[in-house]
Amino acid sequence: MNMNMQKMNMTLLDMIQRWDPFGYGSNAYETEAVDVLQAVHEYDEIKPLARKIQAIYEFSFEEIIPLEKCMKIAEELLKVKNETECGV
């Protein structure tokens, strides 16, 4: 794994953990953050990624995050991913 990829993963993970969609504090989402990070690498479009994020959190917390909220974080995460990939 090159340095850019490692740095990108750290940035994405930080963004995901700080997101805190349920207000439980950023430490409450470690496994979800890793799952979302994996999803960011699998998806290149906002809506499919947003749906995946929604499903990950719903599975863990049995609460649904509105899709608009998921779309917003998905867009931010993909922006970081795309900037890093274009810069390599």
Image (cartoon, rainbow, N blue to C red):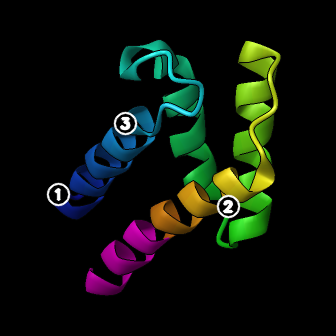
Mark 1, Cα crowd under 10 Å, few <14 / some 14-19 / many 20+, is: few
Residue at x 59% of width, y 62% of height: 72
Residue at x 68% of width, y 69% of height: 46
Q: Mark 2 vs mark 1: give the one in front.
A: 2
SS for dot 2 = helix
Position of residue 29 relative to residue 52, above or below, is above
Q: Amino acid at mark 3?
A: Arg
Mark 2, Cα crowd under 10 Å, few <14 / some 14-19 / many 20+, is: many
Position of 49 compared to 35: left or right?
Answer: right
Residue at x 81% of width, y 36% of height: 55
Q: Mark 2 or mark 1: name the one nearer the start of the chain.
A: 1
Percent from the top left, x then y, of residue 17?
40, 32
**Residues marked 3 and 2 touching at CB (< 8 Å):** no
Q: Residue 11: within the magenta?
A: no
Q: Mark 1 vs mark 3: give the one in front.
A: 3
Q: Which mark is residue 71?
A: 2
Q: Amino acid at mark 2?
A: Met
Q: Mark 3 or mark 2: name the one nearer the start of the chain.
A: 3
SS for dot 3 = helix
Q: Which mark is residue 18?
A: 3
Mark 3, Cα crowd under 10 Å, few <14 / some 14-19 / many 20+, is: some
Q: Amino acid at mark 1?
A: Met
Magenta region, main secondary structure? helix
Q: Which mark is residue 88?
A: none
Q: Which residues are magenta?
A: 79-88
SS for dot 1 = helix
Q: Which residue is mark 1?
A: 3
Q: Mark 1 or mark 3: name the one nearer the start of the chain.
A: 1
